[in-house]
Image: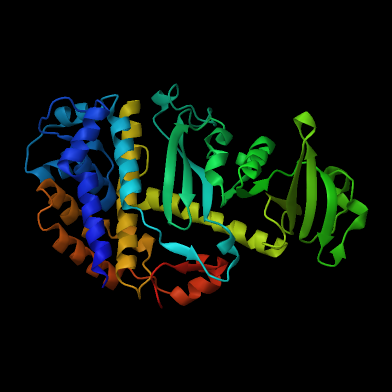
Amino acid sequence: MNRSHASRFAEALRATLGQKSVTARGRESRHCRRLRDVTPQRLVCALVEALGTGRAETIADILRTFNAQTGLRTQYKAFYNRLAQPAFPRFMQQIYRDILRNLSVNILRPAVDGKLAHFQDVVVQDGSSFAVHDALAHTFSGRFTTIRPAAVELHTFLSVFHDQVIDVAVAPDKDAERQFLPPAETLTGKLLLADRGYQSLDYWAAVQRAGGFFLMRGTTDLNPQIRTGRGPRGALPRVAGRRLQDVLPTLPRRRLDLDVAWDRPGGETLRLRMVLIWVRPTRTYTVLVTNVRRSVLTARQVAALYRLRWQIELVFKEWKSYANLHAFTSANPAIVEGLIWASLCAAALKRSLAHVAQRSRATIPISTRIVAMCGGHILPRLLRSALTGFRHLEVIVHDILRYLWDNAGRAHPQRDRVRGRMRFGLDYVGVRA
């Protein structure tokens, strides 16, 4: 066992969920002006335990957890009023960012001889949405107004190497996805994966200027000029100099690798690669656009690597299945958004525990999904320790880690290298087996 990782985690947890730091966040956000029974720290601990350990359907479920943790007899109205304050979502959003900043560790790395060694990180952008109370249609307008007029979308930015979310934005579902892309200057040396909803020539050009890389799915109506084309049997000279839509019906029904260009304002030209993958059941091409050179990733590797985007879908499933990310029956926008951030806090804390368990014992890859399912066995002691000034915290952390080593190891680590995410040229940091 490497005790240094566990000790660093314990210190970081004190700095994140300690009474002084959480109270300071409450005052900064103006959610807390006077300390009463529902103090900022007590509220955070109750929310994380209630949402991270089992099914919570109502605010009353969270209140019962609060009273069990504290031994108080707080009534529903007093508890509800704390959640209904307009500053509640700002407060919980800041706690979530503190958890990400203080408790995240680098858990994966590119294999020395792997293609991903060319990048500082692989990051994924995508969104997940769900309907909320119809009365919130003015605050959280949905895209499908005739079915559910109100819905929220969580625009999420994930680091593959950290196996953790970097940032989240909560917005109405109808808002365009493109505006939530990470700033191009933050992607220097990194590879961004994103779906076709984020397609933008201006953004692609900005990422390229910033020294970043991207691999995005494009829409089938893109119409660049083809400079060169290659198929499984070699070059396709007849497509050079023509527009994609003009030759698309006659292209070979295979995987194709094209060099393409768009004329841009100011006389500039945007030169990129486009990989077309023929999908036989739908009789259409999947379009992937990238600026990664052919010497770094072949067309086959581009197609395979894009599947790493699925990691963010697994995060969304984890949030909804094991952190109570769902629509609580409330027409108060502050409560709805605040509980979203609270759910993300619970998920992030459990994932951080999974990572420190893996870093602390160098022979066991840990499953973040299993750890998410184990919330009821690992969170209560940890959070109740926080409420008593972190009494016996090191002992509790060590007990939790031992439990996870025994119960949350990945079932088939060798299979992961054949069919899982490790097949893309990743290694676990610190794991020798």
Residue 24 spot, x, y in % from top left? 21, 34
Viewer-proximal residue, 148 or 389? 389
Residue 407's place in the image compared with 311, above or below, is below
Residue 308 picture quarter:
bottom right
Residue 335 spot, x, y in % from top left? 30, 30
Residue 321 spot, x, y in % from top left? 37, 52
Left or right, residue 423 beside residue 216: left
Residue ID at (70%, 57%): 293
In the current view of this chain or complex, which residue is farthest to the right?
238
Residue 371 picture quarter:
bottom left
**Residue 50 appearing in the image:** no
- Looking at the rendered image, the quarter that the C terminus falls into is bottom left
Viewer-proximal residue, 255 or 427? 427
Residue ID at (55%, 68%): 425
- Looking at the rendered image, the quarter that the N terminus falls into is bottom left
**Residue 411 appearing in the image:** yes
Residue 113's place in the image compared with 237, above or below, is below
Residue 372 spot, x, y in % from top left? 33, 57
Left or right, residue 221 beside residue 114: right
